[in-house]
Image (cartoon, rainbow, N blue to C red):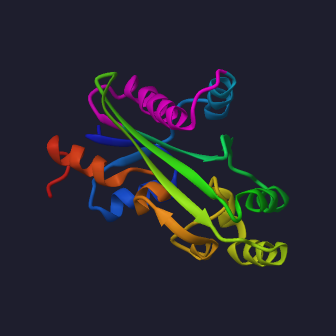
Amino acid sequence: MPDLILASNSVTRRNMLMNAGVSFEAMSAMIDEEAIKDSLLQEGISARDLADQLADMKARSLSQVYPDAYIIGSDQILENNGKIFAKVNNVSDAKEKLKILQNSKHSLFSAAVVYYEGKPIWRFVDKAILTMLPLSDEFIDQYLIKAGDSVFSSVGCYQIECLGIQLFSKIDGSHFTVLGMPLLPLLDFLRLHKLIEI
């Protein structure tokens, strides 16, 4: 049984841990994420607490099956002018989202929670603020053509490590928080618990 499990199918989160030299296994969290998110939103949860709760539930779901492993759950939520946004799955919705986000600031909340023996033993939520440039409809159209299907894997329809960086005039916060996980605090925790060597 692995010592460390990432409760996520996110390629970006897997790559962050692998590139940092962390040994782990990735598994799908056993939750209905969309149903849980909808329920919490109906209760009026904040974007920050939503990221934290989803990360918690992902880790908890696998900790019940692998109680002797350290389970990492992580999630990211985008908020703009008090509205919480979800991922889109078509170009038309992506264009509408970018038209809303352009020429304004939005926040990304990235959370990580670690479970061990069925209990949460560590959690962290970080925030990044991104300022998007004014974007014309023509620019958005060209961007979506060039970026392709990658826009559907990001809640903001961009990947700052790729073409999406061209959408922004300013980013305040950790690069890793923008990617979707507060990596530096998580690495501190893993070192403390001797789950990584350096």
Q: Quadrant of residue 144?
A: bottom right
Q: Quadrant of residue 142?
A: bottom right
> For the point 26% across and 28% down, which residue is it?
68
The quarter of the image holding the N terminus is top left
Q: Is residue 68 left or right of residue 113?
A: left
> For the point 59% across and 71% down, which residue is it?
168
Up-down: is 16 above or below 170?
above
> For the point 68% across and 45% down, which residue is it?
86
In this view, the residue in front, 103 or 7, is 103
Q: Quadrant of residue 194?
A: top left
Residue 26: x and y in percent read 42, 47
Residue 51: say if magenta. yes
> For the point 69% across and 29% down, which residue is it?
38
Residue 126: x and y in percent read 41, 46
Residue 120: x and y in percent read 33, 26
Up-down: is 106 above or below 57?
below
Question: What is the magenta range?
Answer: 43-71
Up-down: is 115 above or below 179?
above
